[in-house]
Image: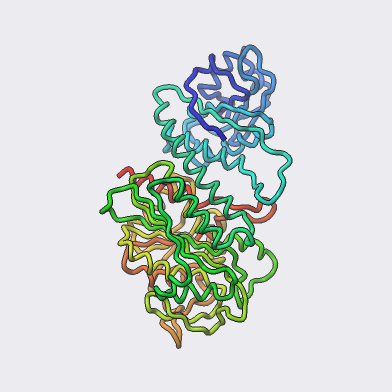
Amino acid sequence: MDYSIESLSLDKLQSDCLLVGIYENQQLSPSATTLDSLCDGLLGKLIARGDIKGKNAETLLINNVPHADIERIVLVGFGERGKVTRKLYRKALAAAIKTVKDSKVKAASCALLDIEVEKADSQWQSRQIIEVFNEGIYQYCATKKVDDKLPLQQLRIVAADPHKQQAENGLNQGVAIAQGVELAKQLADLPGNICTPNYLAEQALALAGQHDKLTCEILEESDMEALGMGALLSVSRGSRQPAKLIGLHYQGGDANTKPIVIIGKGLTFDAGGISLKPGLGMDEMKYDMCGGASVLGILRAATLLNLKLNIVGLIPSSENLPDGNANKPGDILTSMSGKTIEVLNTDAEGRLILCDTLTYAKKFNPEVVIDLATLTGACVVALGRVPSGLFGNDDKLCDDLLGAGDTACDLLWRMPVWEEYQEQLKSNFADLANIGGPDGGSITAAVFLSKFAEDYRWAHIDIAGTAWRTGANKGATGRPVPLVCQYLFNRASV
């Protein structure tokens, strides 16, 4: 998809399809008002006829446009003027791209920067247009034939002075995030027989080859064994696919600046091990590597924008399958930190690969460490599929992430990591157990991880409910790439 900024006035614009806004009670946006005068009052006539009210996410496709170099118009409803929130703006954009797709046009122009959005400027709006449109045109075609390929190939955002520079900045951010999200989705949507730990490692090496500030290091099982990563290696014992610890190192800041470390759980398939999951819906466990896929997407966006930050991306990757050599309930593992862990449920494997990676992260002397993981079904029970769960040991870091989530419309909800929950992880035979029982499952999982992140500022984002959609629209979402990218933008601007 080709995205660009268009600075021509509407009277000189040529377009296959132009998007303009309308508010509730049939109030036209400034661009729509200008367009109406160019089209002999066509929009006003259609409004008077009751064809569109301007409710949020309401659209009207106009195929016959007189006396203009614009072949089609899409009127997009935004709801009540002065009360358009960032969420409502994105909702209207999603409806707009659906209408554009249905019209089968090859190119479109978007004059929606003049919509008044609470707590948003032209830069934010331009970025959201790119993100939402790119989401709308995403098609998975890696392993299936797509007969009805989308004809839309170009989108121009209409931005006149004084908003042109802001719109350009937003476009650059939007394209970077959109490409990061798309990479994360493409990897996550692949089946487990293609997207193996080795495949993820190959994608990381390929990504590093695209930018001179990005390097990649792959730790093999022998390397992890030498480091004492008994928890991580225990998970791969049931698989014929060797585990990989993928390290991506982006040097965009000064050499002496502490890096931001981002860890992504990379379970390319999770059958639960000996504690086998139910068969129904198990196919979706290919999505247990969405945290790892997100790390690749985030680094993709960071390199495209040449962010002046140092970032380390770590992806512990494995499969969790049943086998004669697999973890068994009751096994005792020794982690890289030296802490011993009693395995009470082999399906609580994500925390085992993450805990050794959290210990490994200390070697980079990090400014902060953020881990992203499809960690617990309990998080879905607690929060549903709207926000991701946020846990952490530093209020400033958590507040920064919450703020970034609000800006990106990639929401978080903070959960506690209180010492009282540690009681549920007590074991008679090890330093701690890998599960804490049915109560507060997402919290006890986070408390488990916190025991390996005591030496630095740390946050854990549980994306089990947000990394993919289930049901008829099954597919990866690319979250939390926008959220973490916004956090990085905020850090880079300080």
Image-quadrant location for residue 11: top right
In the image, 29 versus 220, the foreground residue is 220
Q: Is any atom of residue 291 visible in this view?
A: no
Residue 419: % across, % down? 38, 73
The structure residue drawn at horizontal position 56% and vertical position 82%, both measured from the top left corner, is 329
In the image, 276 versus 404, the foreground residue is 276
Vertical position of residue 60 compared to residue 393: above or below: above
In the image, 61 versus 370, the foreground residue is 370
In the picture, which quadrant includes the N terminus? Answer: top right
The structure residue drawn at horizontal position 46% and vertical position 34%, both measured from the top left corner, is 171
Colouring? rainbow
In the picture, which quadrant includes the C terminus? Answer: top left
Residue 259: % across, % down? 33, 55
In the image, 350 versus 96, the foreground residue is 350
Left of 194 or right of it: where is 293?
A: left
Residue 47: % across, % down? 64, 23
Vertical position of residue 76 compared to residue 329: above or below: above
Image-quadrant location for residue 304: top left
Vertical position of residue 276 compared to residue 490: above or below: below
Residue occupying the far right of the picture: 147
